[in-house]
Image (tube, rainbow, N blue to C red):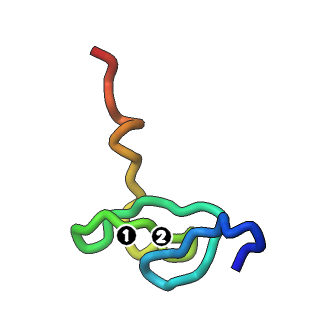
């Protein structure tokens, strides 16, 4: 565990990492570490895809 408690846990393997990726794995969007992102397709956050009106 990170000393300052800033670590996040991969929803697939449970490993604690400093940041997570969003991935589509078998139709579900979940937060995964760099190792587990290869089990699916990395996706962008919806806010990143939003177009200005």
- Is disc 2 surrounded by few (<14), some (14 to 19) or many (20+) residues within 10 Å? many
Of all residues shown, which one is farthest toward the right? 3
Whole-percent x, y for residue 22 in the image: 42, 59
Disc 1 versus disc 2: nearer the observer: 2
Whole-percent x, y for residue 37 in the image: 47, 69
Residue at 39% from the left image edge and 63% from the top image edge? 23
- For the residues bearing labels 1 and 2, Cβ distance under 8 angstroms: yes
Q: Estimate the spatial distance between the alpha carbons at disc 1 and disc 2, rounded to whole Å.
A: 10 Å
Counting every numbered tag in the picture gives: 2
Q: Nearer the viewer, residue 40 or 13?
A: 13
Residue matched to label 2: 32
SS at mark 2?
A: strand
SS at mark 1?
A: loop
Q: Is residue 13 left or right of residue 50?
A: right
Can you tell which quarter of the image residue 35 is in? bottom right
Q: Nearer the viewer, residue 3 or 8?
A: 3
Of all residues shown, which one is farthest toward the left? 27
Residue at 33% from the left image edge and 18% from the top image edge? 52
- Is disc 1 surrounded by few (<14), some (14 to 19) or many (20+) residues within 10 Å? some
Residue at 63% from the left image edge and 71% from the top image edge? 17
Residue matched to label 1: 40
Query: Which of marks 2 and 1 precedes in the sequence?
Result: 2
């Amino acid at each position: 565990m990170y000393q300052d408690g800033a670590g996040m846990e991969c929803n697939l393997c449970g490993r604690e990492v400093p940041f997570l990726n969003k991935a589509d794995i078998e139709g579900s969007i979940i937060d995964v570490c760099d190792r587990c992102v290869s089990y699916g397709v990395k996706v962008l956050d919806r806010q990143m895809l939003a177009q200005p009106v």
